[in-house]
């Protein structure tokens, strides 16, 4: 089966302006490299769709969604304490990210592909009732809820290799024993959001279903390879039914707002091993989401490495 990839430039409308780290050129950086490397002809491309308010409220509170709608009309101010500015149409742009991630899941669940990638996605900081860290709507959380409500998938593995801890996902599902959470990130002592300590393994019935691996500043491929083996075993032992990969490019060397030093090797290795686990446990079902990344060359390198690796590891399930 082909890998499904969203190549619709409408995704790029989710941007906070040229002076903001989450700027308007991130989608173009990926798509240009995707085409230049000759990946497009062998993929199944798809277009964006805007999530309905009901779908947004799978994860977010009604009051919060209404606040975003009002801020979108006003087109000014901040949706959080200063990282996530409102702009005219921010509601529609953020709902399009969420809707497109939902569409990717639908394509997989309908059997049109087993692997998919959405470049502007993986907005893992937003909480159920608030924006945070450049993230308006948490498409990761929305998709987790949708897999259960719309598709009957119970046991889901969420894997995050973005430099920042996926706190909006972690704390929203901290007591959920069927959400397997694995997050390799820069130590919160040095980087936003300051969470994700190794002793955060879940609460109540979910103790032991979460794996947080804080890494030192400057951690490179050798460190990633060492800890990734532990992550692989953790995910495989959990026997998920669906795998989500948040593959933020801000963990590569040279990102302007983080302090890690991976190359695209880390992203390719994660995509390859998760493809194998997906075939073993999940009928091949794996969705990768672009996540963070604020160096355009790194975005191009990391995300095309993920897509190319998914193509090389097409489902054997």
Image (cartoon, helix red, strand yellow):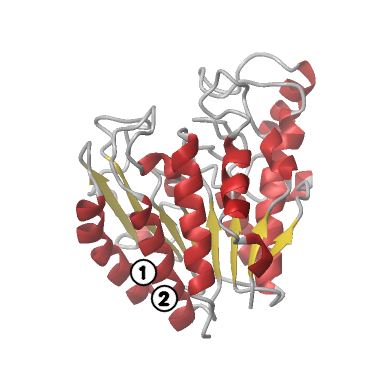
Q: Is residue 112 visible?
A: yes
Distance of mark 1 from mark 2, alpha carbons? 8 Å
The residue to which callout 1 is attached is: 235
The residue to which callout 2 is attached is: 277
Name the image quarter holding residue 101: bottom right
Mark 1, secondary structure of its residue? helix
Q: Nearer the viewer, residue 192 or 131?
A: 192
Going 63% across and 30% down the picture, which residue do you hit?
24
Going 71% across and 59% down the picture, which residue do you hit?
103
Circle 1 residues within 10 Å: few <14, some 14–19, many ≥20: many
Is 72 located above or below residue 33 in the figure? above
Front of the two marks 1 and 2: 2
- Earlier-in-chain disc, 1 versus 2: 1
Residue 20: give its label: none
Q: Position of residue 310 (x, y in %)?
A: 51, 68
Q: Position of residue 265 (x, y in %)?
A: 34, 56
Going 63% across and 78% down the picture, which residue do you hit?
1
The reply, left or right, for residue 129 in relation to residue 296 is: right
Q: Is residue 57 visible?
A: no
Q: Residue furthest bottom?
A: 317
Q: Position of residue 263 (x, y in %)?
A: 33, 49
Count of residue discs: 2
Is 16 located above or below residue 300 in the figure? above
The reply, left or right, for residue 108 in relation to residue 47 is: left
Is 286 located above or below residue 250 in the figure? below
Q: Nearer the viewer, residue 110 or 145?
A: 110
Is 12 located above or below residue 314 in the figure? above
Name the image quarter holding residue 106: bottom right
Q: Residue furthest top?
A: 77
Going 68% across and 65% down the picture, which residue do you hit?
41
- For the residues labelled 1 and 2, say whether their Cβ atoms are less than 8 Å apart: yes
Mark 2, secondary structure of its residue? helix
């Amino acid at each position: 089966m082909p890998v499904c990839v969203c190549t619709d430039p409408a995704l790029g409308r989710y941007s906070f302006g040229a002076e903001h780290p989450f700027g308007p050129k991130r989608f173009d950086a990926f798509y240009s490299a995707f085409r230049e490397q000759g990946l497009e002809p062998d993929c199944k491309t798809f277009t964006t769709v805007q999530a309905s308010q009901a779908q947004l409220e799978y994860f977010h509170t009604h009051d919060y969604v209404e606040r975003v709608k009002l801020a979108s009309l006003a087109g000014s101010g901040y949706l959080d304490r200063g990282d996530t500015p409102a702009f005219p149409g921010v509601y529609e742009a953020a709902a399009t990210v969420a809707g497109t991630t939902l569409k990717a899941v639908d394509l997989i669940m309908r059997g049109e592909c087993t692997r998919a990638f959405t470049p502007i996605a993986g907005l893992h900081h937003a909480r159920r009732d608030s924006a945070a860290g450049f993230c308006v709507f948490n498409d990761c959380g929305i998709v987790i809820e949708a897999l259960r409500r719309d598709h009957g998938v119970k046991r889901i593995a969420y894997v995050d290799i973005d430099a920042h801890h996926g706190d909006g996902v972690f704390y929203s599902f901290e007591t959920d024993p069927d959400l397997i959470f694995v997050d390799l990130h820069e130590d919160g002592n040095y980087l936003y959001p300051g969470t994700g300590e190794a002793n955060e393994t879940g609460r109540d019935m979910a103790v032991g279903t979460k794996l947080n691996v804080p890494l030192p500043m400057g951690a490179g491929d050798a460190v990633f390879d060492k800890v990734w083996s532990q992550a692989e075993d953790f995910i495989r032992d959990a026997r998920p039914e669906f795998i989500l990969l948040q593959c933020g490019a801000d963990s590569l060397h040279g990102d302007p707002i983080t302090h890690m030093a991976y190359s695209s090797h880390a992203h390719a290795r994660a995509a390859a091993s998760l493809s194998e686990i997906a075939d073993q446990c999940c009928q091949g079902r794996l969705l990768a989401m672009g996540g963070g990344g604020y160096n355009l060359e790194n975005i191009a390198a990391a995300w095309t490495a993920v897509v190319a690796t998914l193509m090389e590891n097409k489902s054997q399930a």
